[in-house]
Amino acid sequence: MQYFKDKVVVITGASSGIGEACAIAFAKAGCDLVLAARNIEKLQQVAKECLKFGGRVHFVQTDVANENECSRLMAETVNTFGKIDILLNNAGISMRATFKDAKIDVLKRLMDVNFWGMVYCTKYSLPFLLKTKGSVVGISSIAGFKGLPGRTGYSASKFAMNGFLETLRIENLKTGLHVLICAPGFTASNIRNTALTANGTIQADSPREEEKMMQPEEVASALLKALETRKNVLVLTTQGKLLVILNKFFPKFIDKLTYNAMAKEPNSPLKG
């Protein structure tokens, strides 16, 4: 973990789930942290936990869908620590409704947070990341490699994230900037509890057995290893890896498999 010593890491969506687990993992590795999320009380709790490991921690209440708040987040980071080494674009929301039933505003909200929030944070951190030859990370999803029925807005935002980050990597082949796309697969977190329904209300109950999924701490551990080796793409879970590989050769078969799997969820918006 010597690689991470004294690196400055900005984490969006740091108040719970993968963001919280990554914050603690980076703190243990000796990083200085800037934690961002909308829930200031939860941010304070995560910051308090991270401080136990001896590093410096700063937190900023941030709605990544707001461009000005993303700009302010990066400015505060540089004013506090003087540099940025790693940007972890983790903030995100999900949805659960067919496109036929979903209001357009639901898809706009998904894009504003998952895609534009990542774009804003990357844009305003980029000059500093170029100076440090640092890393931009996008917490994507298997839904960014294969469209998931009932989650059109979510898949669209993650496909957009993947395309943006891949292009950013190619543009910077000669600058030293590292770009990592991380696709965790289904991971235990509150993202399904906070998912939007067809009319934009909060789903509240997860349709999946969270305790049987990959845990956020496992994602954090794998992510740190991928950062240290400056890997381009990290796909996690056996199921996720198989889906990505098989979809290249048997897309129609995987379409049916994906539909059937999502249709089996309790109260699935899919019919049949």
Image: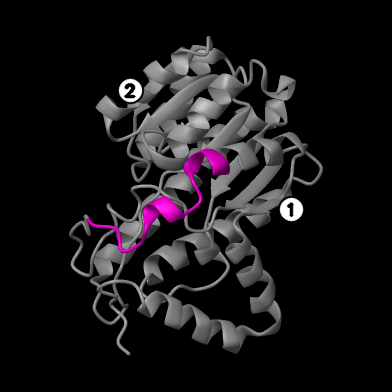
Camera-nearest residue between 55 and 34: 55
Residue depicted at 50% across the width and 86% down the height: 256
Q: Is residue 212 left or right of residue 218?
A: left
Residue depicted at 42% across the width and 49% down the height: 188
State the image quarter where residue 28 is shown: top right
Q: Position of residue 185 (x, y in %)?
A: 53, 58
Measure how far apart labels 2 and 1 are at the Cα level: 38 Å
Label 2 crowd (10 A; few <14 / some 14-19 / many >=20): few
Q: Is residue 34 left or right of residue 231?
A: left
- The amino acid type, in three-letter code, at marker 2 is Gln
Secondary structure of residue under mark 2? helix
Q: Position of residue 131 (x, y in %)?
A: 69, 26
Q: Residue furthest top?
A: 54
Q: Position of residue 88 (x, y in %)?
A: 54, 38
* Relative height, residue 34 to residue 209 (above, below): above
* Relative height, residue 193 to residue 244 (above, below): above
Which mark is nearer the camera, 2 or 1? 2
Secondary structure of residue under mark 1? helix
Mark sitting on residue 170: 1
Residue 177 lies in the magenta-colored region = no
* Relative height, residue 154 to residue 1 (above, below): below
Camera-nearest residue between 246 and 7: 246
Q: Label 1 near label 2: C-beta < 8 Å?
A: no
Q: Which residues are magenta?
A: 205-219
The N terminus: image quadrant: top right
The C terminus: image quadrant: bottom left
Disc 2 target residue: 45
* Relative height, residue 131 to residue 142 (above, below): above
